[in-house]
Amino acid sequence: MTYKIQRNKDVEKIVSEVRARNNFRGKISVKEKYDAPCFSGVIKKLENIESTYNPDYPLHEIGPGYSREKSFNSAFESVLEHEVTHKKDGKGRGFPQTEDYDLERVLTPVANVLKSKGLPNVAIGNQGHTLYTYFANLVSDFGVNNIVCDNRGSEGLFLVYNDMLNSSGKLGDLFEGFLKLQARTFSKKKGVSKIIFYFTQNKKPKKAVQNFLSRTKLMEILPEKRADYLANPDNYEKISVIFAEEFSELVDAQDLQACFFPVFGGNDFARLNDEEVQMKIAIKAYGKEGSEFKPPVFMDDNLALLSVYKMLAKDIEMKVESHSIETERPVSYVSRRKFDIEKDNVEKMRIGINSPGKLEMQVGKYPLKVRSRYQISAGNFPEIRVGLVDCSGSTRREINGKKGKIMNSWAQKNMQWTDSSIFHYELKNAFGLFELFRRKGTLRRSNTRAGVFSDESRMGIDLSESERLLLQPSFSGTQLDKETIDELFQGRNCLVYLMSDGEIANKDDWVTEYRKDSGRIIEQKVKLIDYFVQKAEGHHVFYLHVGEPNETSNYLDSRGIKVVYDDGTNSNVLVDLTRKEIYGEIK
């Protein structure tokens, strides 16, 4: 117990000293965790630090000259110094210093190199990394640790790695090279013997280290100036490129998992899994000059495309109003009271005895009511179907001949579309509706479906699959089939949308319809477009027509379907109409 109390005091003192020494203003959260390795740390958004330590450290014999207390304090201090220095130390030095530098000057150049070498950005290890973020994390840790060493010496860092090596098993070529590189570049070397024991005699890590140092000329810089060089953001990209080029030689392309060894900072790029972050990164890339949208190389192309359309939807101006009404509702029921001839129903009158013991006219159990307000939502439908989006070849046509930016340049040329095409405006409307329903609280993954139609129709089973299908057009002919219309109009009182340029080749084809009449099943032939209109009865249906009016739009309008026209200048049209027609918000 005495030892634990002392250790807690040591931890509090170390946290306080690290904060003061580096002028760190963020939050530092520290917790005990009986686990191996004994230390962990991560700085989130380069602002707040979360760290854990095992009070039982060390879990193995470190060696002569290392007391339990001194080793713990030195190692734990290094973990906190490491996380703080990802932002900045007391001298204003850090790596990467900002999240933008982290992405643009470290991760992006690393990813470009690895991709050019044919190495895929697959998930590796157990810390949420991909191959690209793992390499970038190593680059960032290399820079940070050199700064920490310059400030506080190397012993604590080597003790942390000693603990990791003792608990995490076999050391692969990549991480061995990473450790050897630090052993060479650190301005101080105390404690290096604690990791040398784990090194193999493999020549490949040694070669990668030597090539890196030769190309960067780091060893030609005075030891006391080396950390300053690494902390300079102008040097990040060069260091990142050379590291990726040389150390990728230590990766077996047939066994990428074997290159992973845990980093004690966890995953400095975990924020990339956040949907909001993905949208901001993707929309920034979309906003850059050029004839085509180029997703960040560290981001999956299709995820980036999805993130762009989600962000475009978020940028739609839509003030969401809440509605409430006042009502009376019963909270309990009490026994008889005196009959009120002006208010009470005579049929409920009874003869009873009041408290003084006299006969009187009474009414049986009555409710005790309170007045209250409650929220209402006009858009709670059994199912929302941002129904079918036309993805026929004609929807690739650019509105008004305006040349736009190619949105999916990685696809085959005949599968590409631009941000001035009919299909793009259909997508903006579809994702805008998703965003409206999300803000209204009526969007649920299970009750919202969408799909595309061309030569064949495809409907998602839920929101996630629907979003994916919307970005997989076939751009062939335009056909609607009876089975898809049946699926689109299942149930009653659903909210259904159809988006098209109206060039539906088989709209006048005859289909067989079966209906009941006086208990008999009647078979009759109807045109497909009429079958659509008949099935739409009992639902809230909107048809978005992109482009000039044509035979399809005119006919649907004449049959009572709500037709909305968009010439490409107002991709908010369905959002605005839904707010007016369904939610009663826009006058």
Image (cartoon, rainbow, N blue to C red):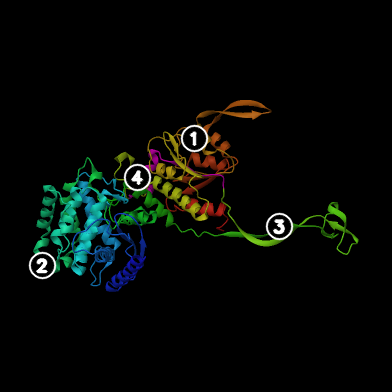
- Looking at the image, residue 457 sits to the left or right of residue 197; the answer is right
Of tags 4 and 3, the one toward the viewer is: 3
The span picked out in magenta is 381-404
Q: Tell me the distance, in whole angstroms, between the alpha carbons under discs 4 and 3.
A: 58 Å
Residue 531 badge:
none
Q: Tell me the distance, in whole angstroms, between the alpha carbons under discs 3 and 2.
A: 82 Å
Q: Residues within 10 Å of mark 1 (few under 14, many from 20)?
A: some
Q: Is residue 572 above or below residue 514?
A: below
Residue 417 badge:
4
Residue displayed at 86% across by 54% down: 349
Q: Tell me the distance, in whole angstroms, between the alpha carbons under discs 2 and 1.
A: 72 Å
Magenta residue check for 298: no
Residue 484 badge:
1
Q: Quadrant of the N terminus?
A: bottom left
Which three-letter amino acid code belongs to the residue tagged 3? Pro
Residue toward you, 424 or 494: 494
Q: Which residue is mark 2?
A: 222
Q: Which residue is mark 3?
A: 330
Tell me if residue 533 can be seen. Answer: yes
Q: Secondary structure at mark 1?
A: helix
Q: Answer with mark 2 or mark 1, whichever residue precedes in sequence.
A: 2
